Image (cartoon, rainbow, N blue to C red):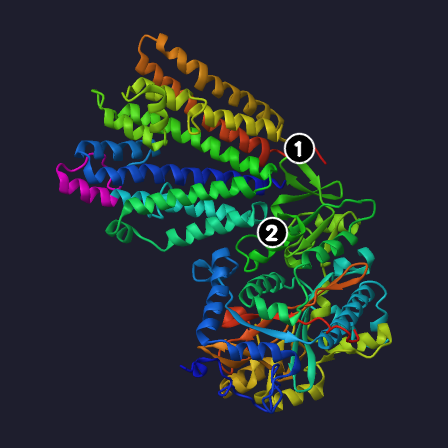
Amino acid sequence: MYKREWLRLDFDAYDLDSAIYDEAFLPDGTPRDHYRALHAAMRAATPERFAAIKERINRSFVHESISFTLHGGDEAQERIIPIDCVPRILAAAEWRGLEAGLSQRLTALNRFLSDIYSTGRIVADGVIPADMVRGCPHYRLAMRGVEVPRGVYAAICGSDIVRTSHGYQVLEDNLRTPSGVAYMVANRKAVKAGLRRLYRRCRVREVEHYGRLLLETLKELAPPGRPDPTIVVLTPGVYNAAFYEHMFLANEIGAALVEGRDLLVNDGAVYMRSTSGLRRVDVIYRRVDDDFLDPLEFRPDSLLGVPGLMHAYKLGNVAIANAPGAGVADDKSVYAYVPDMIRYYLGEEPLLANVETYLCRRPRDLEYTLDNLANLVVKRVGESGGYGMLIGPGATPAEHAEYANAVRANPADFVSQPVLALSRSPCFIDGKPAPRHVDLRPFALQGAQTRMVPGAFCRVALREGSLVVNSSQGGGGKDVWVLADAPGEQP
Amino acid sequence: MLARSAEGLYWTGRHLERAEHLCRLLWLQVEALVDRPVEEIHFGWRRIYRSLRRAPPGGREEFGAGEDYTLADSYTLADDLTFEPANPDSLWSCFASGRENARQTRHCISGEMWTCLNLAWLRIGALDIKQIWGASPETFYAETAREIDTFCGVAEATMYRDEGWRFMRLGRCIERALLTVALLRAQLDAAAQEEDEAEWTSLLRAYQALEAYHRRHGLAIEPDAVLNLLVTDPLLPRSLRHSLQAAHTELTAIGPGPGARASAEATRLAGKLCALAEHDWRQRQRAADIHAHEGALLRKAEGHCRRLHELTTLSYFEYGIEDAPLH
C-alpha cells in the first residue's frame, strides 16, 4: 500500500529551548496533557489540510473585513491581523488561577482609584509616593471628589499577561481604552469553523457571550432612577485604528455608535441627536482618550469631545466607562506598586506576580538600569503601545548612550525591566509546526460584580525569534481555548 | 435611532441605487457595441452623460466618425464611467461610497448584508478596464448588477425592519426617482427628431421593462406608450410613480422628524410628486405642445425630488436643536 506517512505534519524539527517555556510541550518533547488532542490531530493531518484551514480562516477575515486601520503616508489602509490556526490552550485549572488573580487585581486597582481621588489614604500611609500619583500624566484633577457609580473607575480592563519559566506574570494593565476583545470573538468564530471536530472533542468553554456580560456591567453603572438606560459607544470615528471593534461592541450590546458631535449637554444631562429628537443618554462606553472627552475640562482644541460632558458626569446624570483619570492605575511606575495595593486594600497576597521593575526615580534602581542597559527593557512612563521603548539587547551602543542621556535627564520618566523570555506556542508556519512567542490579554469587567469570559486575545510574534507581538509590527493573533473541567474533576 | 447612522443608511441606499442604474446602462451599452449601428452607440453614450449632467472626458460630446473611433472612444468612456475614482459618478465611486457608508453603519445592517456587499467590493476593487474589456465586459456588468440585486435580496430577507431599513429604502427610492427623471429628460433631449424604435427599446431594457411592455402594449414600440409605462405604471417596480409612492410610504412610516416644518413639507411634497407621476402626466395629452409639456413636467419632478432630499436631511439629520423634542 502506498504510504502517505511522510506527508503528515511532524514535530521533528520543532525547536524546544530549555530556557523558554513551551505552552504545548514538556522539555522532553512529550505534549502537555491539555495539548494531547491537538497534538494528535496535527500529527494526523497533512500540511495541505492545515494550510487550507489557515487560508480559509484568514480569508473569512478578509471577506467580512474584520480589520484595523493603519495610517502611513496619506492613505489609511484596512489591514487584517493574520490569524494562526493553531489555538493556544489553557487547562481549566490554569484559567481558574488567572481568573482569580485578575479579579483580585482589578478590585484592588478600583479601590486605589477611589482612594486617590478622595481621601488619599494610601499616599498618607506612605505606601505610594504622593508625587508619583499627583505627577502622573493621567491623573485628572477634575476627578477629585467626584462620586463615581459604585466606585468603579475601571469597568473594563484588559491586562497583558506573559508566561516565563517563573509562571504567569502581569506585564501591564490597560484601564483606559483596552482593545482586542473583538478579535477574541472573531478568532473563535473562524477557528472553530476550521477545526470543528477537534473543538468538540476538547470541550472548550464559550466566549461568545462577552457582549451580554458587558451590557450587564454597563447597566449596573447607570444613574439611579433610570431603569431602562440608554447606552452608547463613543468612538473617535471611522479613522481610528480600532473602529471595527467599536462597531462590533455597539452591535453586540445593541447600542448606538456615536461620535462626540452626536452628543450634546443640555441642563446638566447628555443627549444624542436621534431621528426623533434629542434622546437622553445614561451610560457612555467611551473609546476616546480622557484628553479628548470634554474641551471645557481637558484639551480645549479637541474636536472629538462633548462640551459640558464632565459637568453632567459630576452631577451624576451620566456614567462614563472607564472613568476619566483611570489611567493613573495603569501608569508604568504605579504598576510597580500594584502588589502593595493588593496587600494594602485587600489584606491578601497577590495571586498573580508582577514583572520585576526598576523605577529610575530611585537612585539605586537608576544606577542598576544604567549599568545594565544592554540587558534590560527600558520604558517611558505614560507611553503605551510599545512606543518610546528601548530593548537593550537589540539596540546599538550609540542607541544605548543616547537613551542613557535621556534617562539621566529625567529619571522619574523611566522604568526598566529584565528582558522576558516569553513563552512559545506552536504555530503553523510554512507548512510546519514551529514555536513562536506569545502573550495573552484576557478581559475583566467590573460593575456590581466582576465578570470574565473564559478566553483572551492571544498575540503572537510571527517572525522567528521576535518578541514583538504588536499587530502594527508583524504580530498576529491566535484563538485561546480554555478547557472545561473533565467530568468528575473537582472545579 | 442615531441621526448620523440613519443618514449613513440613507446614503448607502442612494449610492447603491446609483451604482446599479449605471451598471445597467453600461451593460446595454457594451452589448450595443457588438451589433448596433454607430449612431445608436453614440446616442447611448450621449444619453448616459446627459443624464449624469457630466461632460465626457475631453469635454466633447461629439464622437469621431467611423467604427474604429467609436470603439476607441467607447473604451475611454466606459473606463471613465466604470473605474475612474476621480469621477464621483463612476460605478467604482458609487460603490466605494455605498460601501463606506455601510461600513460606518455596519452595526445597523445585518451581517449577511455586510458580507455580501464587501465581497462584491473586493471583486470590483481588484479589476480594471483592461481586464474586463479583454474578456467580456457584458459579464462584468451583468455580475455587478446581480451582486447589487443579491444585496437587495439579502437585505429584504435579513434586515430588521426598523427605522434604519426605512431610511435605506427612502434613499433608494429618492435616488431611483431622480435617476429616472434625469434619464427620461436625457432621452427626450437626445432622441433624434425622427423617432428610432431601437432607442426606445433600449430605454425599456434599462428598466427591465421590455417584457412588461410587450405584455401590456403588444409588440409595436410607441414612444408615448413607453413613456406612460415608465412614468405612471403602478405595477412596474422601477416606474417613476412606483418609486415616488414607495418614498411617500417610507416617509409616512418614519413619521414626523424633529425638524417639524421641513418634515411637514416633505410629506406634502411627496404627495404632490405622486400626483404628478399619476394624474398630471396623463393630463399632458391636453397640452398644445405635448413635447414641451412633457419636458416641463419632468423638470418640475426633478426639482421636487431634489427638494425632497433636502427636506429629508433637514427633518431628520440636520435639524436645529433649539426646537427639537427632548426624550
Q: Do callouts 1 and 2 mark residues in contact (Cβ within 8 Å)? A: no
Residue with the most extreme left position = B66
In which quadrant will I find the C terminus of chain A? bottom right
- A13 sits left or right of A354 in the view: left
- B295 sits left or right of A130 in the view: left
- A282 sits left or right of A115 in the view: left
Q: In percent of the image, x 47 and y 31: which residue is there? A: B174
Question: Circle 2 sits in a helix, a strand or a loop, which is it?
Answer: loop
Reading the image, the residue beneath label 2 is A304
Assess whether residue B63 is covered by the magenta stretch. Answer: yes
In which quadrant will I find the N terminus of chain A? bottom left
Residue type at mark 2 is: Leu
Residue type at mark 1 is: Glu
Sort mark 1 into few (<14), some (14-19) or many (20+) by Cα contacts within 10 Å. Answer: few
- Where residue B99 appears, x then y in whole percent? 47, 47
Q: CA distance from mark 1 to mark 2?
A: 22 Å
Q: In percent of the image, x 68 and y 59: which residue is there? A: A210
Q: Are marks 1 and 2 on the same chain?
A: no
- B208 sits left or right of A476 in the view: left
Could you say which is closer to the camera, residue B197 or residue A389? B197
- Where residue A6 appears, x then y in whole percent? 44, 83
Q: Which residues are magenta?
A: B57-76
State which quadrant residue B289 falls in: top left
State which quadrant residue A189 falls in: bottom right
Up-down relation of residue A383 to residue B82 (above or below):
below
Q: Chain of mark 1?
A: B
Question: Circle 1 sits in a helix, a strand or a loop, which is it?
Answer: loop
Reading the image, the residue beneath label 1 is B322
Q: Chain of mark 2?
A: A
